[in-house]
Image (tube, helix red, strand yellow):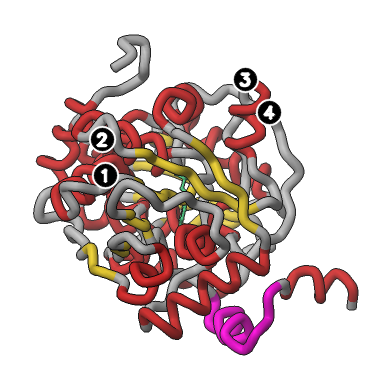
Amino acid sequence: MNASLPMTIDDIEAAARRLSGRVLTTPLVASASLSRLCGVPVGLKLEHHQTTGSFKLRGATNAVLSLSNEEHARGVVAASTGNHGRALAHAARAEGSVATICMSHLVPENKVSEIRRLGADVRIVGRSQDEAQQEVERLVAKKGLVMVPPFDHPAVVAGQGTLGLEIVEQMPDVAIVLVPVSGGGLAAGVAAAVKARRPATRVIGLTMERGAAMQASLAAGKPVLVEEQPSLADSLGGGIGLDNRVTFSMCREFLDDIILLTEAEIAAGMRHAYAEEREIVEGAGAVGIAALLAGKIKTIGGPVAVILSGRNVDMGLHLSVMNGGTDPFRKEAAA
Ligand SMILES: *Cc1c(COP(=O)(O)O)cnc(C)c1O
């Protein structure tokens, strides 16, 4: 492994020991329908069944458990209202620390109350995500709270990497791992773990055509900004950070490819998960199935593991996708 990388398999193994008994070891189950379609065994890693509904609990819990006693007493802070915010709130409470989650006045009340219910101290400031992030920085400077970012942090990446260790144990002959990519914390950790155990296994990242920040950055050879657009895979929105320290170099080292999906393909992935596998997954969690259904992955050489990364989808949106809607955002824009 490249010695200049920000973390190694040892960090992921240490994370696995720390997380043992604290997060679920999620099942990897055979998909009869996708195995038939692809002509090789296809297994679904049901990480959307993880506590809080996404893999983000692994990284958040590892970050909280990596704090010094003094940092633990001061508490953690983040600006995410999505899966990372939920996960950090849960992890802090479970470990006896306090999470402060900053959000803007525009965040819907159901999301605010969900994060409050998980025991977080919620601060509502300003009218944008940027203003919420400024409040995070103010609390770090003024009160000494410890910021736990959603992906670009060695302890977070190591925590997500434990998912890769589980896959190799559950499917020892895995030839291809399909992993959703946004900021790249999940992909960096999983790919580092899988390549350390099985260097010949291909690890392929998946994301939406609308705002593929990691793919654009890898193509440019450095972190770049992309325009953000609404997508069914809302958990894959956002950039990788122009000052990216951890995930860009790791994705460049370990990912074999990144494949882009259209909104219609993501919708088809969500429908297949529900109709054929009886699983409710959010758009971001369905990109692996979507890529197989779209014929975008060459499945030769052995079994495929597909990570279903989350299930926190608005149920009205899920229902509309099940009823055949592929692009609710475009319709809204046209109306
Ligand atoms: C955060 C998230 C991702 C992307 O993870 P990154 O580490 O940002 O690449 C994928 N799926 C779900 C459900 C998520 O919450």
Q: Residue under label 3, please give it.
A: 221
Q: Could you tell me which residue is drawn at 44 percent across and 33 percent down?
A: 255
Residue 224 x %, y % = 68, 28
Of marks 3 and 2, which one's residue comes earlier in the chain? 2
Q: Could you tell me which residue is drawn at 36 percent across and 79 percent down?
A: 277
Q: Residue under label 4, please give it.
A: 224
Q: Given the image, on which type of amino acid does mark 2 rest?
A: Ala
Whether label 1 touches label 2, CB < 8 Å: yes
Looking at the image, which is closer to me, 74 or 211?
Answer: 211
Residue 82 appears in the rendering = no
Number of the label disc, if any, that sits on residue 193: 2
Give neighbour class at mark 1: few <14, some 14-19, many 20+ (Cα, 10 Å).
many
Looking at the image, which is closer to me, 67 or 185?
Answer: 185
Give neighbour class at mark 4: few <14, some 14-19, many 20+ (Cα, 10 Å).
some
Q: Residue under label 1, please give it.
A: 164
**Dividing the picture into quarters, in which one does residue 53 lie?**
bottom left
Looking at the image, which is closer to me, 149 or 227?
Answer: 227
